[in-house]
Image: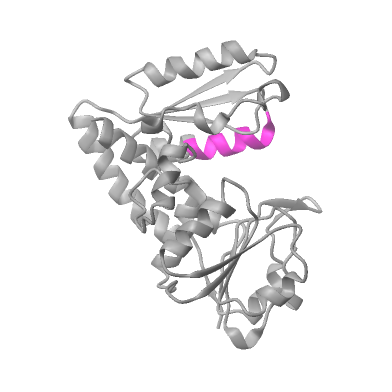
Amino acid sequence: MTTLLKAQPVVDQKIADLTKRCQSLIQKGKRPLMKVVLVGNNPASLTYIRNKKKMCETIGAEFELDQLDSSISKTDFLAHVEKLNQNPKVTGIIIQLPVSNELKSLRISQLVTPEKDIDGFHGHNTQWLYEGSIQTNHLLPCTPKGIVELLDYYQIPLKGKHAVVIGRSLIVGKPLSMLLSNRNATVTLAHSKTENLADLTKIADIIISAVGKAELITAKHINPAKKTVVVDVGMNTLHDKLVGDVKFDEVSPLVAAISPVPGGVGPMTVISLIENLILASEKQS
């Protein structure tokens, strides 16, 4: 029987812990405050932001949205971010992607000071991965952090296992491959230019797809004898329906475990972000 890697039990467990830690910070006079900087009014971004706001409020943290005009100049944008960096009341900052074309040439991931970089994208924070850290109590990129904690919760071993990560973004694929390698998995990093992808996935113990292509992974990519674990990071729209990178109905009967979309990696990313907010606030206090 296939195990569904649902996020809700993990999220519920973490909410209880993060609420206690948030209350402890408030008692010390350091209430966590997440500040999200949004350029323009991208509908998908606004949906993600609402989820972050809701989770902040659930644990007792503060949330503020700074929605900037899509025509903002580089100079004004940089000045705004630096003002937040210098504000001691703001304990965590997110620059919501995508930004406007005018700002795309900026190194967005390096603009938030490392101590407030709750996305975990700054080089100072990703350095933990290069140094071989196996811990998740650092300000690490949220989706990789959430995936590893999801696998830990369901007691899926990584040591000695062959993991195929599909997607090489700086947000998911690359940091995830390092985090898995630090946990002693053998990692193959595949991507859109990889030839004969099915040859790799059929020999994998764990498949993690983060390429953003609807239903890319089908039955032809699975070897049922391997009892594969599949983690679906994709959030795609197909025929007005939210689907992952994995053709769920086709793949799920063939594998040992699979994360659903929605209800899998997405909530783990949000709770990891909240966890980073609390970590950042604790270090600042």
> Is residue 219 part of the magenta span, yes or no?
no
Q: Looking at the picture, how far across and down is residue 126, in whole percent? A: 45, 44
Image-quadrant location for residue 279: top left
Q: In this view, does 253 lie to the left or right of 154?
A: right
Residue nearest the observer in this picture, 217 or 187? 187
Give the residue at x 56% y 77%.
Answer: 205
**Residue 250 locus on image (x, y percent):** 72, 74
Locate the C terminus and report the quarter of the image it occupies: top left
> Bounds of the magenta span?
42-52
Q: Is the magenta stretch mostly helix, strand or loop?
A: helix
Quadrant hosting residue 182: bottom left
Q: Judge from the rendering whether residue 105 lies leftward or rightward of residue 19; answer left or right.
A: right
Residue at 20% from the left image edge and 37% from the top image edge: 24
Relative image position of residue 230 (x, y in whole percent): 59, 70
Total marks in image: 0
Q: What residue occupies the far bottom of the structure in this picture?
A: 225
Along the line of sight, which residue is nearer the eye, 224 or 239?
Answer: 224
Residue 35 sits above or below residue 227 on the image:
above
Q: In which quarter of the image is residue 101?
A: top right
In this view of the protein, which residue sits in the foreground, 27 or 180? 180
Q: Is residue 51 above or below residue 69?
A: below
Q: In the current view of this chain or complex, which residue is farthest to the left?
A: 28
The answer to whether 176 appears left or right of 220 in the picture is left
| Residue 43: in magenta span | yes
